[in-house]
Image: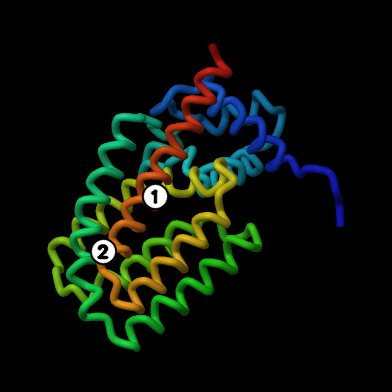
Amino acid sequence: MATYKTRAQFVADDLRRRILGGEFQGGTQLRQDALANDYDVSRIPVREALLTLESEGLVEFHPHRGAFTTELSVLKIRELFELRILLETHILRHSIPRLTDTDLKKAEDILKKYDEALDSGGEIDNWSEYNFAFHHALYAPAELPETLAIISQLNTKSDRYIRMQLLYTQEIEKAEKEHHGLLELARKGDVDQACALLKTHVQEACEGIVAVLDERATMTE
């Protein structure tokens, strides 16, 4: 197997450095033809690099407009995660007494797939999907569809930040441990402890992301 970087890997690594370093502000359009000229490559590796950065939450594609750097607003991150705490602890409190063995088995199966994806380092674009699928499995029995719909919207907006947290804070094992702890507390029917752990889990994810952004900002000063 070749140990050298492909053109797409080189472009992705350098663009990641430039985005996190503050060279490209949030909402900046990343024109593929201009980047291809910058890196003296064709548009194909540039496209592959942008897709990689999209999976990491640093780039987003807008229909008919192309690729843009993600808006990395600390205020927005804090607001999203505070709303998640309010609604997700609320729905979990209603859900736990209703959880059946089937519900718990479904959550456990999702968690196994999530663990495998995290441990392998692959399927990065699926990490946040597994994350929400696991939480959804625990929340759905509450039978609060409007609350769950809002939580789903919040998770979609948080998606890129969740992937950033897992990739850049080096706390994958901690996240896995907390998920298993949450499942076990739900299985025991310990509502108060489960909600306390969930609150801490979401709060610390938020602080981890903010710390990454603060560190990058300090490096560019």
Q: Quadrant of the C terminus?
A: top right
Q: Is residue 159 left or right of residue 6?
A: left
Residue 100: quadrant of the picture: bottom left
Horizontal arrangement in the rendering, residue 90 relative to residue 44 (left or right): left
* Earlier sequence position, callout 2 versus callout 1: 1
- CA gap, disc 2 and disc 1: 27 Å
- Position of residue 6 measured from the top left corner of the image (x, y, whole percent): 76, 44
Q: Amino acid at mark 2?
A: Asp
Q: Amino acid at mark 1?
A: Asp
The residue carrying pointer 1 sits among few (fewer than 14), some (14 to 19) or many (20 or more) residues within 10 Å by Cα, namely many
- Across and down, in percent, residue 10 comes to 71, 37
Residue appearing at x 16%, y 61% in the figure: 147
Figure quadrant of residue 61: top left
Residue 130 location in percent, x, y? 45, 65
Q: What is the secondary structure assignment of the residue under circle 2?
A: helix
Q: Residue furthest top?
A: 221
Q: Are marks 2 and 1 in contact (CB under 8 Å)?
A: no
The residue at which mark 1 appears reads as 159
Q: How many marks do you count on the picture? A: 2
Q: Is residue 159 left or right of residue 215?
A: left
- The residue lying toward the viewer, choosing from 16 and 101, is 101
Q: Which residue is mark 2?
A: 192
